[in-house]
Image (tube, rainbow, N blue to C red):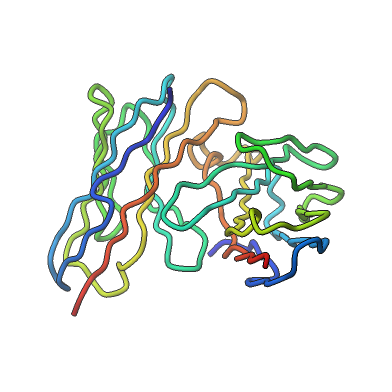
Amino acid sequence: EADIYQTPRYLVIGTGKKITLECSQTMGHDKMYWYQQDPGMELHLIHYSYGVNSTEKGDLSSESTVSRIRTEHFPLTLESARPSHTSQYLCASSDTTNRDRGTLAKNIQYFGAGTRLSVL
Amino acid sequence: KNQVEQSPQSLIILEGKNCTLQCNYTVSPFSNLRWYKQDTGRGPVSLTIMTFSENTKSNGRYTATLDADTKQSSLHITASQLSDSASYICVVSDRGSTLGRLYFGRGTQLTVWP
């Protein structure tokens, strides 16, 4: 069972509001990721982080921003939400630093339960 | 273009029956292939992960196969249970970057009826 938590689970807000989606993991993982997933579609990477103070944009362009001030915390922020931002947002983490684990194990990503965002 | 295609898109089977889900990929250079199970409203959970040198890997009633030559993988579920109802996602990782970029399929939506 992965110890990675996302809040809120569901969020319905009006256009123009600023929102922050929280993601925390208690496993000490170095890498963290944010994915966006629409119903019946594949996951798209929108942000990732190699570690503290390291953030990069993913494959899918997103108007959201992220920060990684602490190892365990990787929040995602939308300054002004729009209906086009309606989607499910999934946070994940992986541990690539543990020398006791094989290469494959280091590549496994553990996912949170997701935040389903609806912007009206 | 690196892609992961899954079939069928959806599948309905009766409890206790077996089923096989397919995954074809064009990702290169290939590093590993994973199958994830995603329950409705939840995040994906890893079932199996295989490198090019592995032909098969089991996890309980789940058995994954990999043919790196034809770039195909399958996930076989034995004696299905109601709790197997979920989306099964095939994910392929390349060796082209330090991050080990992941390519996701759209998933096969499996429904198990009593």
User: In the visual, does A79 lie left or right of B31?
Assistant: right
Q: Residue at x 52, y 60 (%)?
A: B43
Q: Quadrant of residue A87?
A: bottom right
Compared to residue A20, the image places residue A106 above or below, namely above
Residue A43: % across, % down = 51, 47
Residue A50: % across, % down = 73, 37
Q: Residue at x 85, y 40 (%)?
A: A53
Q: Which residue is drawn at 75% across and 63% down?
A: A15
Residue A70: % across, % down = 84, 51
In front: A120, or A110?
Answer: A120
Q: Residue at x 80, y 61 (%)?
A: A16
User: In the visual, does A80 lie left or right of B90?
Assistant: right
Residue A93: % across, % down = 63, 49
Q: Quadrant of residue B17?
A: bottom left
In front: A101, or B104?
Answer: B104
In front: B108, or B80?
Answer: B108
